[in-house]
Image (tube, rainbow, N blue to C red):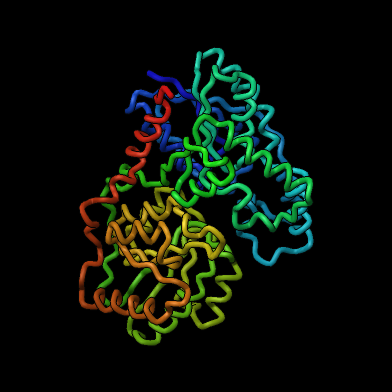
Amino acid sequence: MKKVLVITYYWPPSGGAGVQRALKFVKYLTEFGVQPYVLTVDENKASYPFTDNTLADEIPASVKVHRTDTSEPFGIYSRLTGKKSIPTGFSNESNPGLIQKSSRFIRGNFFIPDARRGWVKFALKEAKKILDTENIDTVITTSPPHSAQLIGLELKRFYKDRVRWIADLRDPWTDIYYYNEFHHLYFAKKRDLQYESDVLSKADFVVTVSNELKELFKTKTSGKKNIYVIPNGYDEEDFKDSFTEEKSSGKSFIISYTGTLADSYNPNIFFHALKKVTAAFPETDIKLRFVGNPSSSLIEYAKSISLSKNIELIPTVSHDESVKFLLKSDALLLVIPEIKNDKGILTGKLFEYLASRKPVICIGPPDGEAASILNECEAGKTFGRNMETELTQHLSELIIKRKEGTDLNINIKNDLYKKYSRRSQAGELAKIITNPD
């Protein structure tokens, strides 16, 4: 079998969205003649926003996992702020105070490209040992954190043509929506841009999650050709069991949102539409269920317009439990952040929503890639932030159907969503890994 070293910071027991892509690639690569080895951080030293111990069960027994030491500043940050959880790029912090703002400035100017770069020197040393001992000639680095790409960059410089390097970037780098919140000084931003340019230009192959991101990265590499799109996806095995679904007659209607919801997502149009339908259908118990980590200021806004009794907050749960919440919903809410390059945002959430076969209500650009996939699969509708009337009407129609006893589960057109399975995507990655060019 073809051997490959997968270098990823996020790995079980890390939870949340960041771990899914690498874990699922590794889970299925062996089916396509590729034997992965994994290099990650020591779980006792890592800075994970969430943990999910159930994910360890998905690591194939044949996969060797190597863990290394690291040196990171998040312990100091937690002591200063009094927060036990580690922020995800500080994107979900509402109304930052002086300490948070100072932390962002320090992070943006003294920890480039990110605050997990203290792992690089430890990972680099271990990576060389693994490559030499196991005679591996292909490396995949997946990010964020984008500091993981510096490991691949240095390995390429050290081994040159002896190692083929695939850089997998799930998110933009210097174009990420919260980038300016780090208040980079000139020298810091210049250095970060140089790191990004070096990675994109010197990797043998670049993989990303959407066509929009592909085009963005091409502009930074003089039109580099070896950029491939493998979107995020869903794991068929996560949806194979039959969970008991809530059968709300016509008296309840549950709309669920899973994961992070930052201020920049701007879901207020949905809150206003929801307020109108709750007034129109007072006999129906309409619940907007957040499973995960919504911004406190957004929740307060929803409550300020009299939606308190309609909001249900569920703290972050295991991935398995998250899937169960999807299956126990009448409809699912997807919100694309209102930011630059929003048309190319394709989160793993979208594909798991598809696999749940629940109607998706998307707030975002109607001409974006998420909207295109929903239209292609006939799995939901997308509403721009100036389409409150249309959104309210759509919500009303769904609630009426539920009141009438109509099963809202959808028969996704021609099973087109199956091409977004993690198994299928591992096959696409395997083609790149075994590509002789």
Residue at position x 36%, y 56% from top? 353
Provide residue 235's location: percent of width, then percent of height. Answer: 35, 43
Q: Nearer the viewer, residue 238 or 44?
A: 238
Residue 290 makes an appearance in the image: yes
Residue at position x 58%, y 27% from top? 67
Residue at position x 53%, y 35% from top? 167
Q: Quadrant of residue 248?
A: bottom left
Q: Nearer the viewer, residue 317 or 30?
A: 30
The vertical placement of 274 against 87, above or below, is: below
Provide residue 373's location: percent of width, then percent of height. Answer: 34, 56
Tell whether 268 sits left or right of 424.
Answer: right
Tell whether 33 sits left or right of 267.
Answer: left
Residue at position x 68%, y 33% from top? 70
The vertical placement of 227 against 303, above or below, is: above
Residue 107 makes an appearance in the image: no
Looking at the rendering, in which quadrant would you find the N terminus? top left
Provide residue 249's location: percent of width, then percent of height. Answer: 25, 73
Question: What is the total number of numbered labels drawn onto the structure image?
Answer: 0
Provide residue 33's location: percent of width, then percent of height. Answer: 34, 23
Q: Nearer the viewer, residue 283 or 32?
A: 32
Looking at the rendering, in which quadrant would you find the C terminus? top left
